[in-house]
């Protein structure tokens, strides 16, 4: 009897010890989980308290991934799905502290076979530019009487705008090129009348595709393909942007004509009989399914004294041809840099995505 009682007591004691150990292990697991949750909350708090650091890291990661895989697109992105914005803060065009504005290369020379002479460009390389990467390129064309420095120079609106948009993650990593529309012998430029200058401007359509694009590809980390190539311009440059884009639909996927002059195609009696109105195309080239513009943007201000009619006409022709595009008639804006810069904000926001 005593032996059986002793055995019973030992069993009870063992059971109580095991239960105690089980409770301790459970408590330890709960404490670890609580500690992990606390650490996660602490890290989240740190991230919240330091948004600029988190934002910088995210931007750098995006730039690196995009440079390595330039042809991968988010197919769900539709540039026509959202309205453009024109009431935007002037701070977008101003230098901000703690912002990387990339590297601006000025007065870069290349030989143009189209001009049979050297031409110059200004080139903006994006923050974190990697010579072993591959970046899309935006070619920017000035208006009548300007040159390659008109929109892209140190602290220019386009220089500041791109840097600020990149910082906020709105703009993709890209190279921006300030194009010189004059394509001819430099030593006769000052002697040309309006007709001669217009003829030299028209040649930039071929110069961009035949000479400038190969030069960029040979000397910079440029991504191939029309999905990685954009052209934009204002006024006469807006007309040349449309001409360049439609002449080279197989090479250029994004096109912006901002208050374009009326000489892409004939626009009725618009400026009839002057060098302003000589049409570049007899008829606009018809895109195929493979060469339809990825994003085609037209815009003109309600106070523009020159190009409202031409811009509206181009939009009507695009509609008749079944060419998708975004046309904005914007109240309150005239034919000047105040309009150019808000339009470039919208265009940069829609390309290479």
Image (cartoon, rainbow, N blue to C red):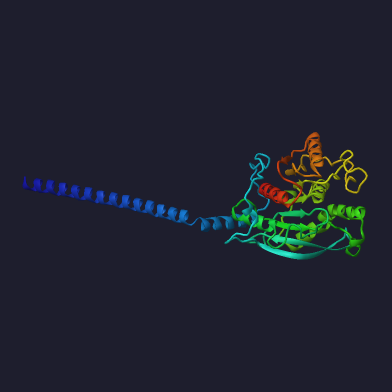
* Foreground pick, 218 / 281: 281
Q: Is residue 131 visible?
A: no
Q: Is residue 19 left or right of residue 236?
A: left
Q: Is residue 121 left or right of residue 279?
A: left
Q: Residue furthest left?
A: 1
* Foreground pick, 156 / 333: 333
Q: Is residue 14 left or right of residue 165?
A: left
Q: Is residue 107 visible?
A: yes
On the image, which quarter does residue 316 sit in?
top right
Q: Residue 25: horizontal and vertical position, in percent?
A: 28, 51
Quadrant where the image shows the N terminus: top left
On the image, which quarter does residue 43 sit in?
bottom left
Q: Residue 204: horizontal and vertical position, in percent?
A: 84, 54
Label count reads: 0
Q: Is residue 281 above or below residue 213?
A: above
Residue shown at the point (81%, 64%) measured from the top left: 110
Q: Residue 86: horizontal and vertical position, in percent?
A: 67, 45
Q: Residue 35: horizontal and vertical position, in percent?
A: 35, 54
Q: Is residue 259 left or right of residue 63?
A: right
Residue shown at the point (79%, 61%) measured from the top left: 215
Residue shown at the point (10%, 49%) measured from the top left: 6
Residue shown at the point (81%, 44%) measured from the top left: 307
């Amino acid at each position: 009897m005593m032996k059986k009682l002793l055995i019973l007591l030992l069993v009870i004691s063992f059971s109580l010890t095991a239960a105690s150990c089980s409770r301790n292990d459970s408590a330890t697991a709960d404490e670890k989980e609580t500690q992990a949750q606390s650490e996660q909350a602490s890290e989240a708090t740190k991230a919240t308290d330091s948004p600029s650091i988190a934002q910088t890291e995210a931007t750098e990661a995006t730039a690196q991934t995009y440079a390595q895989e330039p042809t991968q697109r988010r197919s769900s992105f539709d540039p026509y799905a959202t309205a453009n914005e024109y009431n935007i803060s002037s701070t977008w065009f101003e230098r901000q502290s703690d912002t990387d504005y990339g590297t601006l290369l000025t007065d870069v020379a290349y030989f143009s076979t189209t001009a049979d002479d050297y031409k110059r460009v200004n080139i903006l390389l994006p923050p974190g530019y990697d010579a072993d990467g591959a970046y899309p390129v935006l070619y920017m064309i000035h208006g009548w009487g300007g040159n390659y420095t008109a929109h892209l120079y140190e602290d220019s609106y386009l220089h500041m705008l791109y840097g600020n948009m990149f910082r906020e993650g709105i703009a993709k990593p890209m190279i921006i090129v300030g194009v010189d529309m004059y394509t001819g012998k430099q030593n006769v430029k000052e002697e040309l009348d309006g007709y001669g200058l217009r003829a030299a401007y028209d040649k930039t359509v071929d110069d961009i595709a035949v000479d400038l694009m190969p030069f960029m590809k040979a000397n910079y980390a440029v991504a191939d393909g029309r999905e990685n190539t954009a052209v934009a311009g204002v006024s006469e440059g807006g007309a040349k942007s449309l001409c360049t884009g439609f002449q080279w639909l197989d090479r250029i996927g994004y096109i912006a004509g901002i208050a374009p002059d009326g000489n892409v195609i004939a626009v009725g009696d618009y400026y009839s009989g002057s060098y302003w109105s000589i049409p570049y195309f007899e008829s606009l080239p018809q895109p195929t399914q493979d060469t339809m513009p990825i994003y085609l943007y037209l815009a003109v201000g309600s106070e523009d004294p020159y190009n409202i009619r031409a811009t509206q006409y181009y939009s009507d022709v695009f509609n008749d041809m079944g060419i998708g595009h975004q046309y904005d008639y914007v109240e309150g804006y005239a034919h000047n840099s105040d309009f150019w810069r808000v339009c470039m904000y919208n265009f940069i926001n829609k390309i290479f995505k």
